[in-house]
């Protein structure tokens, strides 16, 4: 190959690799709560880096989400704040009283405390930015009580992701570099917002943060140190009997039709193998393709998912999630049916549809009714349910499907139910939807 062409191909490939490396990551990284709330709020926030933020909640909502994931409760922080202010008010954090006194047992500082060396920002601190409408001189001389008396506006809040800061300069002025992780950061399209890591360059003399809002320079106004705690995880349960072991497993209700993937797998007496609990024994081997019904999913004490199953030959036990394929909900996942007061309604007359549908364990997401006349013309109506039972008569299916509009001749009523449940690939549990069609109701419109 011509060397010049080869160099061009390699250069193009390198550009593509670099471009892809700059794209934001949409998948959350793994987050495991340790019980150390300082570490956990930052760790969770960092898993959101590069994720598209929820517009409307923005930076304050992101802080609340991270706080919830870290295990903070309403005695430590207002978990419903959507506005970036530590002062009292609707949708604000309310860490400070109107006089500047700390609440929620937090610690509160201003840039004056940082400038004097009385406080150095720490990992997990919340930093609030904004401006005073009657001052452009910064915040390095103000206490919290003095700030409380001024006309202030808050524009942003972020989470400090590393202890301390380093020295730097900006426009020839001495500054600090503060490392944060922030929600509500503008995207390149000017509409979407993102979670991003930030290096905030703050002027030592004033706390100037490097941007402006409504014609005013924005400063770091307050630093709030929430009353973080270290919550010791509960002692692990060490089961000594099969009953204790089963109780220690995490159970999720389901109701699925499964197909065994091979003839070399085993239905076990407990949701584990001999290496995790010695009392687990093989009930029998599976038959490839055989149909099983799962009534629950267990996450065992080593983190693997198992179906609780029953087979057509009466065998019952537990099957590893990766050893079966979920094919949908069994026909008897829904009990009840649509009923007509008569199967020979008169032409031009209305007719009620009655009946109650009940799901064994799965939630009914939607029910769709299709009323088809002798000429093939169909009326359709779908309703959202969100419960395990559904009464047809008071619903829009009954009121919207009009028998009076049907021509004489044979017709049908068909109900389709969408169920929301869970299945597993052996290592993970996912929420899925399964569709069940109920038996067709036949009728004949007469004159």
Image (cartoon, helix red, strand yellow):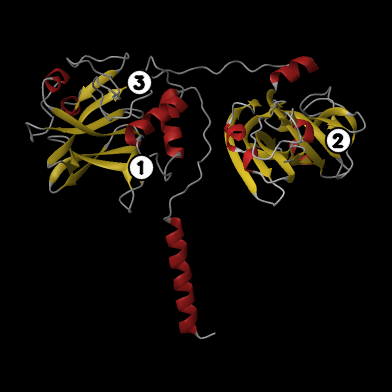
The numbered mark at residue 78 is 3
Q: Position of residue 178 (x, y in %)?
A: 28, 37
Q: Earlier in the sequence, mark 3 or mark 2?
A: 3
* Disc number lying in front (2 or 1): 2
- The residue under the point 22% across, 23% down is 109
Q: CA distance from mark 2 to mark 1?
A: 48 Å
SS at circle 2: strand
Q: Kindly indicate the quadrant of the structure image that contains residue 282.
A: top right
Looking at the image, which is closer to me, 353 or 200? 353
The numbered mark at residue 338 is none
Q: Earlier in the sequence, mark 3 or mark 1?
A: 3
Task: Tell me the quadrant of the picture where the N terminus can be found.
Answer: bottom right
Looking at the image, which is closer to me, 303 or 351? 351
Q: CA distance from mark 3 to mark 1?
A: 23 Å
Looking at the image, which is closer to me, 394 or 348? 348
Q: Earlier in the sequence, mark 2 or mark 1?
A: 1
44 to 9, vertically: above or below: above
Q: CA distance from mark 3 to mark 2?
A: 50 Å
SS at circle 1: strand
Q: Is residue 330 left or right of residue 86?
A: right
Q: Kindly indicate the quadrant of the structure image that contains residue 113.
A: top left
Q: Is residue 368 left or right of residue 146?
A: right
Decide: few, some or many residues near mark 2? Use Cα within 10 Å; few <14, some 14-19, many ≥20: many
Q: Farthest right residue?
A: 313
Task: Tell me the quadrant of the picture where the C terminus can be found.
Answer: top right
Q: Position of residue 375 (x, y in %)?
A: 70, 52
251 to 165, vertically: above or below: above
Query: Disc 2 marks which residue?
Result: 266
> CB of mark 3 within 8 Å of CB of mark 2?
no
- The residue under the point 48% across, 69% down is 13
Q: How many marks?
A: 3
């Amino acid at each position: 190959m011509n060397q010049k062409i080869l160099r061009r191909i390699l250069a193009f490939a390198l550009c593509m690799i670099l471009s892809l490396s700059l794209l934001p990551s949409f998948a959350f990284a793994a987050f495991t709560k340790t019980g150390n709330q300082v570490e956990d709020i930052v760790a969770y926030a960092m898993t959101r880096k590069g994720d598209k933020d929820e517009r409307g909640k923005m930076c304050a909502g992101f802080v609340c989400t991270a706080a919830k994931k870290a295990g903070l409760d309403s005695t430590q922080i207002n978990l419903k704040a959507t506005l970036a202010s530590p002062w009292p008010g609707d949708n604000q954090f309310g860490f400070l009283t109107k006089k500047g006194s700390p609440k929620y047992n937090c610690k509160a500082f201003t840039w004056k405390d940082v400038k004097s060396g009385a406080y150095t920002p720490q990992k997990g601190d919340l930093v609030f930015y904004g401006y005073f409408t009657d001052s452009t001189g910064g915040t390095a001389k103000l206490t919290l009580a003095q700030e409380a008396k001024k006309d202030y506006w808050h524009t942003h809040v972020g989470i400090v992701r590393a202890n301390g800061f380093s020295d730097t300069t900006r426009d020839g002025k001495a500054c600090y570099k503060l490392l944060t992780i922030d929600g509500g950061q503008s995207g390149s399209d000017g509409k979407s917002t993102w979670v991003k890591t930030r290096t905030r360059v703050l002027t030592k003399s004033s706390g100037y943060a490097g941007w402006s809002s409504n014609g005013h320079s924005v400063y770091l106004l307050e630093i709030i140190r929430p009353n973080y705690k270290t919550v010791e995880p509960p002692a692990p349960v060490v089961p000594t009997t099969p009953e204790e072991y089963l109780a220690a497993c995490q159970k999720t209700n389901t109701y699925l039709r499964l197909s065994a993937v091979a003839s070399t797998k085993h239905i076990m007496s407990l949701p584990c193998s001999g290496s995790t609990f010695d009392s687990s024994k093989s009930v029998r081997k599976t038959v490839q393709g055989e149909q099983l019904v799962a009534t629950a999913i267990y996450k065992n004490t080593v983190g693997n998912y198992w179906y609780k199953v029953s087979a057509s030959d009466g065998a019952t036990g537990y099957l590893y999630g990766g050893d079966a394929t979920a094919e949908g909900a069994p026909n008897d996942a829904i009990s009840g049916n649509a009923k007509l007061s008569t199967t020979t309604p008169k032409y031009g007359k209305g007719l009620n549809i009655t009946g109650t549908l009940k799901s064994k364990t799965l939630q009914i997401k939607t029910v769709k009714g299709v009323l088809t006349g002798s000429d093939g013309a169909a009326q359709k109506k779908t309703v959202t349910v969100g419960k395990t039972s559904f009464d047809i008569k008071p619903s829009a299916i009954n009121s919207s499907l009009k028998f009076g509009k049907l021509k004489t001749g044979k017709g049908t009523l068909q109900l389709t139910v969408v169920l929301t449940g869970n299945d597993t690939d052996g290592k993970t549990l996912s929420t899925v939807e399964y569709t069940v069609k109920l038996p067709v109701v036949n009728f004949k419109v007469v004159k």
